[in-house]
């Protein structure tokens, strides 16, 4: 997958978890909790969704690596390479 495809997939899963978000307004550096106001259960649900979609286990210690769309794209690209 390309970085653009990974980012799109991340945004799709994010919107599935938090349908009140507008995909077009999510910036690459917007923090899931600080800027997009996801709670810890939303983040956990996102991690589960990403695991199912990408087949990548994301340990809790790596949660900061998926805290923004930009960071998540890089993290998932490295894990799926």
Image (cartoon, rainbow, N blue to C red):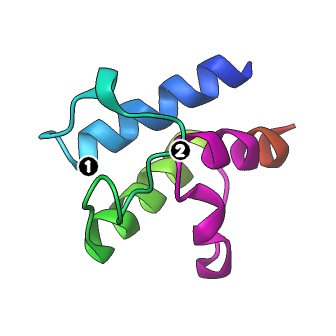
In the image, residue 42 lies at what x, y percent? Answer: 28, 64
Q: Residue at x 35, y 65 (%)?
A: 33
Q: Nearer the viewer, residue 62 or 35?
A: 35
In the image, residue 47 lies at what x, y percent? Answer: 47, 60
Indicate whether 37 appears above or below 76. below
Q: Is residue 19 left or right of residue 9?
A: left
Say which label, 1 or 2, has the lower sequence index: 1
Mark 1 highlights which residue? Answer: 17
Mark 2 highlights which residue? Answer: 29
- Mark 1 and mark 2 residues within 8 Å of each other at the beta carbon: no
Q: Is residue 45 left or right of residue 55?
A: left
Is 44 within the magenta? no
Q: Secondary structure beneath disc 2?
A: loop
Q: Residue at x 38, y 39 (%)?
A: 13
**What secondary structure prevails in the magenta region?**
helix
Indicate whether 66 appears above or below 34. above
Is 57 within the magenta? yes
Quadrant, the C terminus:
top right
Q: Nearer the viewer, residue 69 or 50?
A: 69
In the image, residue 37 lies at what x, y percent? Answer: 25, 61
Quadrant, the N terminus:
top right
Span colored in magenta: 55-76
């Amino acid at each position: 997958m390309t970085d653009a495809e990974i980012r799109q997939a991340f945004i799709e899963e994010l919107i599935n978890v938090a349908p009140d978000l507008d995909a077009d307004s999510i910036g690459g550096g917007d923090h899931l909790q600080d800027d997009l106001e996801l709670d810890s259960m939303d983040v956990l649900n996102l991690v589960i969704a990403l695991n199912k979609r990408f087949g990548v286990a994301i340990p809790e210690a790596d949660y900061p690596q998926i805290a923004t769309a930009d960071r998540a794209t890089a993290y998932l690209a490295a894990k799926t390479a």
